[in-house]
Image (cartoon, rainbow, N blue to C red):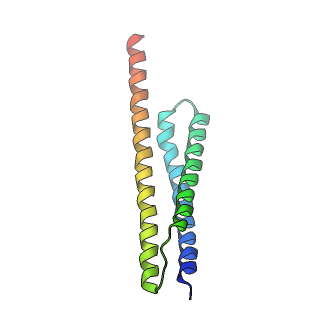
Amino acid sequence: MNYNILAYIVYIIVIVIIIGWLGRRLHSIGRIFILNLYKDDLSACDAINNILLVAYYLFNIGYALLKLRRWQYVRSCGDLVYSLSLNIGLLLIILAVTHYFNMAMIYLASKKRKNILNHKNQIL
């Protein structure tokens, strides 16, 4: 039996489920944070949220497909479990890091916007 083919099939199914589910969750929940940043402009909020979702999908699907190119040869069931856990775990770490990076950028942008608004109010 060719364990690499089985590893590819399981990996692709798992990453599609993880990336799809997480993308939908982050898109719906993240709208609240972006809406806080763009209180007056719902269309800008939705546009930015949709752009972030597309970038999320492109980045993570691209990484996951590139990972298939560097997949090590799988000789046994033990190697199959090791290989799947390593590659799926790495993808989850990358998802977490990019999510926290995006949240930090949204936080910094909201602080900058508040500082600009406070400065404008002080001038008026």
Residue 69, given in percent of the width and then of the height, sits at 55, 66
Taking depth in this image into account, of 99 and 42 the one nearest to the observer is 99
Q: Quadrant of the N terminus?
A: bottom right
Q: How many marks?
A: 0
> In this image, 13 relative to 79: left or right?
right
- In the image, taking residue 50 as reference, residue 70 lies left or right, namely left
Q: Residue furthest top?
A: 124
- Vertical position of residue 118 compared to residue 62: above or below: above
Direction from residue 110 to residue 14 in the image, left or right: right
Q: Residue 46 appears at what percent x and percent y?
A: 59, 40
| Residue furthest bottom in the image | 1
* Horizontal and vertical percent position of residue 7: 53, 77
Residue 54 placement (x, y as % from top left): 59, 49
Q: If the image is split into quadrants, where does the C terminus sit?
A: top left
**Which residue occupies the foreground of this view, 64 or 26?**
64
Image vertical order of residue 95 relative to residue 82, above or below: above
Quadrant of res 94: bottom left
Residue positioned 46% across, 86% down in the render: 76
What residue is shown at x 42% (from left), y 22% (from top)?
116
Question: Residue at coordinates 61% horizontally, 39% vertically from top-left?
Answer: 47
